[in-house]
Amino acid sequence: MVGIYLTEAQVGTYAIVVGVLGVTAIMRGGGAALYMPTIKPAEFEAKASRQFWWCSGFLAFSAVITVAVIALIPLARSSELVQTEFPGLLRASELPGLSATMWAMAGRQLIGGPLTVGRMRMSVELRFAELAKLDTVLALLRLALTWVAAASGMGALALALPHLVMGFVELLYYFVSNACKLSDMRWDGSGFRDLAAKMRWPLIAAIANSINGQVNFLVLGVLIQASTLGVFYFAFQLASQPTVFLAAALQNVLAPFLARDRGDPILERLGMERIFAASMLFVPITTVATASFFPSLERLLWGGRWAAANSGIMFLCVGATYATIATILTGPLLGLRQFKAVAAFEAGKIFGTVGGAALGAVLVWRRNTLLPEWISDESVVCASTGLTMTLASLGQLVWIMRKYGTGWNTILSMLTFGPLLAMLTAVAAQSIGHSLVTTLELPSSRLGAAVELGAVCTVYGMLIVLAVRFTAEGTLRDTVSVLPAGIRSRLNRVLALH
């Protein structure tokens, strides 16, 4: 619905706000969301209130800084220095809906403390099925509210308002389900010095994570047109959906489980290798599928409105593949309380996202001397970001698996097999889908796009299942073996793994 009702510039406006939050909320919740899943259930009750105040203090400070930036926007518009020396900043400050969108995002910061405590208690107590149902309901409600807000002409605010409203809905659920308690908010000043010492590396990791995931949009927003940023943000979000849904969820699942193996080197190494192998096989299946489906899906839903993203989305999907796996591996690292390694992971990602965005912006800025005319600005930014994300994430994955003693041959095999399998399957599916439309002589309309999309999805799904079943049976068995009993038995029957 975003692509139907919002313009590229309106999506770009929201991306700039996300980038601003990457600076004003750079400390996020002080790293509480990274530390709390590592607390064992018996200790959580005693530590919850201190974590709540630690987290809420940082978030309240972030909200205050965000409001200060909102107050400075009119001054930026009237400043002669900005008008003459920083035209990109002036252009960004004049975007419609910028201030209203920032107010909504600042409001979300204020309720972040109890939201963090509630979610982390459910993770520590292994209430994952309940969390999955909650997230599904929230996602559907957010989707519906975004649709209504966008159709009502709210512009960029339509993307921010649902996050604030769903935050209150989520908070209400936590209180009703006893995941968040009033006792969690009772002031407890004892042990804050020790807490600050323990939270040093989680805080550094949170800062790096904030820079990595948001500041790139601010860099681009100041240097390129909002419409170009809008197309990039649209493609980036599509490519990053596995990171959003898989990585974030699996972090909270894996951290408590690996916390139980903490202190046993053999179990720690086996756990890391199994997670790495499964991630390298299954994550590319979802990320590369996005690039495979997008051209026909875009014609079907948006009629060519976002076609500028076609040539660059594959670069972002490849980058998102390795970035997602690197993010998933921070879950086990958190469970093992390797906070320094997590901080190094997050810092390394900055090279991929912010560095790639800056490189793309410079290339667009000097395109007359550095680029041929036929390459679009959107393709340049997508390609530079996707390639640097890939390089940064590859370095991180090699480093962490070598740290746990995995051999070079095993690492290289895992790094290449899954992505290549998914990419070859995607190319085959796209070729068959395009050939079918050509053979049937269907027009390049929504009907033709629907037929092509159906063919690509069907072929991709069938080929990837067969490929995984007969080329990676060992990894498939290991992955299925850790699933809940009901799902495990059904998959064993469907895939003939008995």
Image (spheres, grey):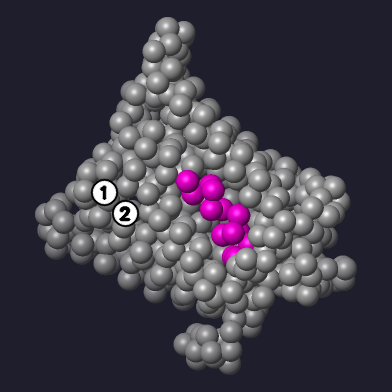
Please report the residue visible at 73 percent of the width from the left and 42 percent of the height from the top.
Answer: 204
Q: Are marks 1 and 2 in contact (CB under 8 Å)?
A: yes
Main secondary structure of the magenta stretch: helix
Q: Is residue 83 visible?
A: yes
For numbered disc 2, what is the local secondary structure?
helix
Q: Is residue 261 above or below residue 451?
A: below
**For residue 229, what is the image quadrant?**
top left
> In the image, is 397 to the left or to the right of 99?
right
Badge 1 density bin: few <14, some 14–19, many ≥20, Cα 10 Å: many
| Residue at horizontal 50 percent and vertical 28 percent from the top | 69
For disc 2, the marked residue is: 146
Judge whether 487 appears above or below 118 on screen: below
Q: Does residue 354 appear in this view? A: no
Residue found at x 73% / y 49%:
202
The residue labelled by disc 1 is: 150
Residue 127 occupies quadrant: bottom right
Which residue range is magenta in the image? 107-120
